[in-house]
Amino acid sequence: MMANGSADLPQIQCSIASLWRFPVKGLAGQAIESVTVEPKRCFPFDRVYAIENGPTQFDSHAPKHLPKVNFLNLMRDERLALLSIDFDETSHTLTILRQDRQVAKGNLSTALGRNMVEQFFAAFMSNELKGPPRIQRADNHHFTDMAEPLVHIINLSSVTALGQMMNEPIDPNRFRANIHIKGLEPWVETKWVGRTLKTNDVEIEIVSPTSRCAAINVDLKTANRGRSLAGALNQQFGNDNFGVYGRIIRGGMLSQGAPVSL
């Protein structure tokens, strides 16, 4: 018998609709067609950088997980939603755009490149900053909300169903997930904990639901805060969970369009 009675659940088959990484914590995501993942590791190039909001205790030589409030983030800094990004994983060059116009660019692997991007955020986020913004990074460290290296998965049918509950369309990227799955019934992922998701050679153990914060209330087109999605979830289901976290237990290639079984 598997956790939560999952042995009684039917097998499902669906597919990966899209894959997303968020190279800089708090900034927009970047769609990718495929990626190679490794066991017990985070999604590659996901939250590998963060923008420190005032002095923190982060030490790049001995990195430890810190709460998101130490960095610029959508939960508190909705103005970030006005920006889109392009990130080159080979050179670590970040390009920041506003309304499709480049407003900053820098190679984040160099002090000069980081300084150029930091100067932009010093001006753009001046009212929200507690001190000079600093771009942080450490080898093999990800600035994710969870201390354990996990990937984040959402069911697109549940996004549609939540939008129907709210009487407005919901952008799936409000939930900042790495893997978007299509072809499911709404809300079936709430029963996935303890089961294993498989696609190609990759196996992902579903370990927990995702408890949501106020970041999901930010409209990504206007950067305005809307109605509380977490409140709607609580009213409907008695909790604010949306999506699931998974631990990669067998690595391999994830690719857009690949079939998924559970």
Image (spheres, helix red, strand yellow):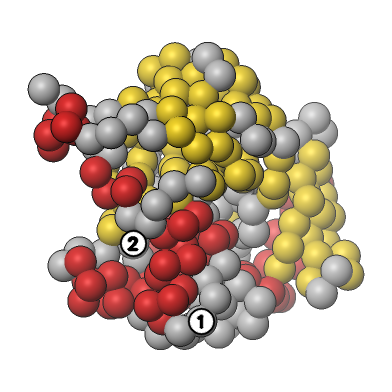
Q: Nearer the viewer, residue 147 or 107?
A: 147
Q: Quadrant of residue 205?
A: top left
Q: Is residue 155 above or below residue 84?
A: above
What residue would you read off at disc 2? 212
Which residue is rendered at x = 46% and y = 57% of the image?
Answer: 157
Q: Is residue 233 above or below residue 225?
A: above
Q: Nearer the viewer, residue 105 or 54?
A: 105
Q: Is residue 213 left or right of residue 77?
A: left
Q: Quadrant of residue 51?
A: bottom right
**Label placed on residue 121:** none
Disc nearest the viewer among 2 and 1? 1
- Secondary element at image label 2: loop
Q: Nearer the viewer, residue 168 or 47?
A: 168
What residue would you read off at disc 1? 168
Q: Earlier in the sequence, mark 2 or mark 1?
A: 1
Please tell me how crowded label 2 is: few (under 14), some (14-19), or many (20+) other residues with Cα within 10 Å.
Answer: some
